[in-house]
Image (cartoon, rainbow, N blue to C red):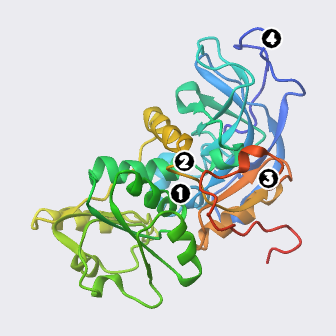
Amino acid sequence: MGIEQRSNAGAGLVPGASPAGAATMRAAVQHRYGPPSVLVVAEVGLPLPGRGDVLVQVGAASVHPGDYFVMTGEPYVVRLVFGLRRPRHGIPGRDLAGVVAAVGKDVTALRPGDKVFGWSATGTLAEYACVPADHLVSVPANLSIVDAAAVPTSAMTALQALRDIANVRPGQTVLVTGASGGVGSFAVQIAKAFGAEVTGVCSTRNVDLVRSLGADHVVDYTETDFTRTGKRYDVILDNVEAQPLAAVRRALAATGTLIPNSGRGGRWLGPLGRIVKARVLSGFTRQRLKPFTSVGKRQDLLTLADLLTTGQVTPAIDRTYPLDEAADALRYVAAGHTRGKVVVTPSDDRTDENDPTRACARPNLPPLRRTNRSSRK
C-alpha cells in the first residue's frame, strides 16, 4: 500500500540535511476502505524524498470532506483514482504545514528549517510527509503552523471557483451557501477581496461568525429560504446543494453563474449525476451552471499567501485534534457542521496559544470552539 516504506534517511538528500532520529514515524493508517474506525495510529517507515521532493516534519494537517470520501472509498468512483480494492496510499490527509526536515538533490528553493505549507498526494496525517517541492510555499510570517495547514485545498477551491470559473468582479453580488464551513469561510473572504457584495447562508449559531468574515448580508437558512426572497445574485457558490437545482436557479441572475460544489451524491457515482444534469441544462439557458474540480496549483497557493499576509483572508479554525484522534476529526468533518476548518496535530498541543503568530489579522473574529479531550462529546 505504500505505507510501510523502507527508509534510508540519508540517501538522495542534501548532505547534512537528514532529519534526526530513527527511520520510523507515527501515522494514521488504514489497510482497507471503511468508516473512521478503520484508522489506526502505528509506527511506519519514514518516507524517503526523491530528487525533487521535500521531507516535511508535519506541524499540523487539516482535513476536509474529500479526505472522508477517500477514506471510505465511497462514492465508489473515487476508487478508480485511489485504489480499487484498498487505498493505494494508506495514510489519509492532503493538506499540511510544518518545517522542512530534508530536501532532495534537485531542490534549491527550500532548505531545512523553512516553515512551509501545501499539499501532498501520499498522506499528511503523520509526523512526516514527503511532498513535491512545487506543492509547497513559505508560511506567511503572521500565520501559525496550525492556521497555515487549514488553507491549501479549501482556500484553493474557493479561489478557483470565484476567480477562474465565475470571474467575480467588483460590484457583483455573490451568494455563498455553507458560508461557515471550510470552503465557504474562505469564499466569503476571497469574494470580498475581489470587491463583491457578499451574502453568506448559514445556520443561526454561525451568523456572527459569517458576518465577522466580512459578509455584507447573512441569511439564516433556518428562518429564510434564499431561493424565495426575490433577490437574484450574479454568482452562487453552492457548497451545500440542499435545494433542487431548479430552486437555486430562481435566485440566480439571468446571465449569472451557479457553481455546485458539495461533492455529495449517490453511493456509486457521487455527484456525477448532478454534474451531468447541470452541464446539460447550461446548454439551454443563458445562466451558466458550472460544476468544477479544484486542482492544486503552486501559483494559487502563492496568491493565497499574499491574501493571508495582508489580512484579507484569515483561516477560521473550529477544532484541533491530536494524531491519536484523527478518526474523530474525520468523523466530525463528515457530520457536515464544521465552523471553518478542522486540524490534526502530531502532538497533543491542540492550540499553540503561546505562539505569537496565532494572533489573527482580523481581531474581531469570534473565538471558535477549541474542544479539549475532557469536554468533547
Q: Check whether the beta carbons of the residues at disc 3 and disc 1 lie within 8 A of each other.
A: no
Residue linked to disc 3: 323
- Whether residue 124 is situated above or below residue 52 in the rendered picture: below
- The kind of residue tagged 1 is Gly
Residue 54 position in % (x across, y down): 65, 25
Circle 1 packing at 10 Å, graded few (<14), some (14-19), many (20+), is some
- The kind of residue tagged 4 is Gly
Residue linked to disc 2: 311
Q: Residue furthest bottom?
A: 223
CA gap between label 2 and label 3 equals 29 Å
CA gap between label 4 and label 1 equals 37 Å
Q: Quadrant of the N terminus?
A: top right
Residue 66: give its label: 1
Q: Looking at the image, is mark 3 or mark 1 earlier in the sequence?
A: 1
Q: Give the residue drawn at x 66%, y 49%.
A: 147
- Judged from the image, the secondary structure of the residue bearing numbered disc 2 is loop
Q: Looking at the image, is mark 2 or mark 3 earlier in the sequence?
A: 2
Foreground disc of the pair 4, 1: 4
Residue linked to disc 4: 16
